[in-house]
Image (tube, rainbow, N blue to C red):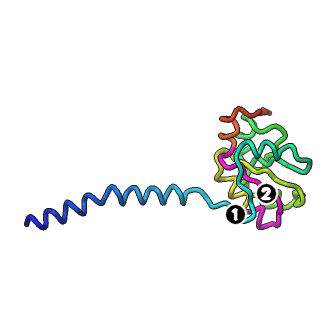
Amino acid sequence: MLAQHFKIMKALSLIPLALVLCLTSLSAADKPPVPQGVKNVGVEEFDKLRAEKNAVVLDVRTEKEFKEGHIPGAVNLDVNAPDFAKKVAALDKDKMYLVHCAGGRRSLKACGVMKETEFKKLVNLEEGFASWTKAGKPVEKK
């Protein structure tokens, strides 16, 4: 009987470890992977790249989010809009697109769609617009 009690206690002691492992794998799976050929950068590099002649800042958040504040000069195309792929296909594929959303998930989705339609120069803002504002970078409102 005592041996059974110890087996039960040992099994119960493993539950917290199992929970931690499950939660860690869920949070990692929650964010899509960076598509091959897409450069994932932080705020400072993203800001430097904005100055390049052929760079286009592409904000893939909703129109409402965009109007509340966006990176100066950004173009807004909502990645979750039904016509996103059609609108993206009409863009100049030779330009460099600096893609961002609010936190980094939707922009990775957008980069994946763009990569499938043969865009060559895609840069993703790693932590999205939240990191931009946190760094005190300029914001424009429309």
Which image quarter is the C terminus in? Answer: top right
**Numbered label attached to residue 122:** 2
Res 37 quadrant in image: bottom right
Viewer-proximal residue among 109 and 67: 109
Q: Give me the disc on residue 35.
A: 1
Q: Nearer the viewer, residue 129 or 43?
A: 43
Q: Are marks 2 and 1 in contact (CB under 8 Å)?
A: yes
Q: Picture coordinates of residue 95 (x, y %)?
A: 88, 56
**Residue 56 appears left or right of 32:** right
Residue at (36, 60) in percent of width and height: 18
Please report the bounds of the magenta region as a residue range.
113-128
SS for tag 2?
Answer: strand
Which residue is at a point 7% across and 66% down the rendered structure image?
A: 1
Place of residue 103 in the rendered image (x, y in percent of width and height, measured from the top left): 64, 46
> Residue 14 is drawn in which quadrant?
bottom left
Sequence-first tag of 2 and 1 = 1
Label 1: few (<14), some (14–19) or many (≥20) C-alpha neighbours in 10 Å: some
